[in-house]
């Protein structure tokens, strides 16, 4: 929950700075074969993935419902 990475790369604003937004959205939706990053396309839309990446690049961690 700290976005510092564990099985994958950190998701902090600094770590995502300068990375193309479209590429990050594609990674969220399609995953990364051979890694712990699964495809999320069955569970979220392109617009939702775009919103998520915009928040992460701005340094705003998405809120976890119920917390």
Image (cartoon, rainbow, N blue to C red):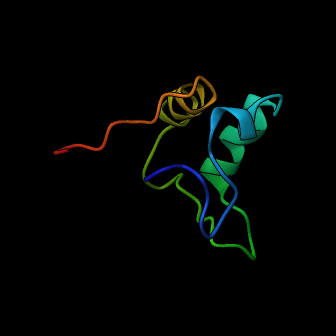
Looking at this rendering, what residue extends furthest in the left direction?
Answer: 66
Q: How many marks?
A: 0
User: In the visual, does 5 lie left or right of 17?
Assistant: left
Res. 56 image quadrant: top right
Q: Residue at x 70, y 44 (%)?
A: 26
Q: Is residue 59 left or right of residue 21?
A: left
In which image quadrant can residue 25 be found? top right
User: Looking at the picture, does residue 53 appear above or below residue 36?
Assistant: above
Residue in the image at 75% along x and 77% along y: 34
Given residues 53 and 45, the one toward you in this image is: 53
State the image coordinates of residue 43 (x, y, percent, origin top left).
Answer: 42, 52
Instruction: Give me the residue at 63% from left, 28% from top.
Output: 57
Q: Quadrant of the C terminus?
A: top left
Q: Nearer the viewer, residue 26 or 66?
A: 66
Give the percent coordinates (x, y) of residue 9. 70, 57
Tell me residue 58's x, y (percent).
Answer: 59, 22
On screen, 12 above or below 51?
below
Q: Is 33 placed above or below 48 here?
A: below
Relative to 67, 45 lies left or right: right
């Amino acid at each position: 929950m700290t976005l510092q990475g564990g099985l994958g790369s950190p998701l902090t604003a600094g770590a995502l700075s300068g990375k193309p937004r479209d590429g990050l959205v594609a990674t969220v939706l399609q995953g990364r074969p051979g890694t712990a990053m699964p495809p999320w396309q069955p569970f979220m839309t392109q617009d939702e993935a775009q919103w998520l990446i915009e928040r992460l690049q701005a340094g705003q961690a998405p809120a976890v419902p119920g917390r």
